[in-house]
Image: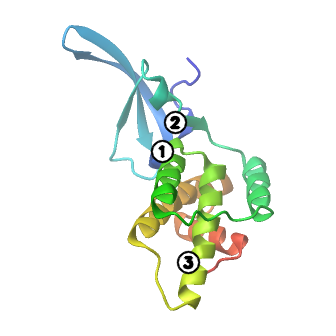
Amino acid sequence: MKYKIDDIILYGTDGVCRITDVTERKIGNDTFKYLMLVPVYNEGSTILVPLVNERLLNKMSVVPSKSEFMDMIERVKNSEAQWIDNDIKRKEEFHQILDNGDVYSLICLLKAIYKHQCERIAAGKKLHVVDERIMKDAEKVVCDETSYSLGISRDGALSYIRDILGYGI
């Protein structure tokens, strides 16, 4: 097994989690093993990830170190924010990025949404509801990651991300 008890990992939109146990559950006649995850910033919640489900296991990744995280931020800052004009394609692409939970891709997604949000505000308009919801989901994961990797408060993490990307709204 790639991970062990007490490892801190990222798990999709649930953000930073601690692996607390490997447990077995019986479903029908079969018994399956699960990793038990507890979100670091929501310890009242528990997530069970079946060891036989590759798709769910692939949503898990190692939390980057502070220097790795800062390198990632620099790469995003130096990249171009990509906006997809087609609402349906954008929604599908954004949901896929959220589902994958890759922090670099999520920060790129936020950069694109923040840029678009600024353009909409300048035109006297708001973000579409779907884009706003996706932004909030991505911000939760990125803020958890930022807070954990950089050792800053969760409250300060959103301002930090927005400021460093140049979209302090």
> 28 or 23: nearer the eye?
28
Please report contact status of discs 1 and 2: CB closer than 8 Å, yes or no: yes
Report crowding for label 3: few under 14, some 14 to 19, many 20 or more residues within 10 A (C-alpha). many
Q: Earlier in the sequence, mark 1 or mark 3?
A: 1
Q: Is residue 55 left or right of residue 142?
A: left
User: In the image, what residue type sits under mark 1?
Assistant: Asp
Q: Residue at x 65, y 77 (%)?
A: 167
User: In the image, what residue type sits under mark 2?
Assistant: Lys
Residue 117: give its label: 3
Report the residue marked by disc 2: 59
Give the x, y percent position of residue 65: 72, 45
* Vertical placement of residue 145 versus 30, above or below: below
Q: Residue at x 48, y 44 (%)?
A: 99
Callout 2: SS: loop
Give the x, y percent position of residue 84: 58, 62
Q: Earlier in the sequence, mark 1 or mark 2?
A: 2
Report the residue marked by disc 1: 99
Callout 1: SS: helix
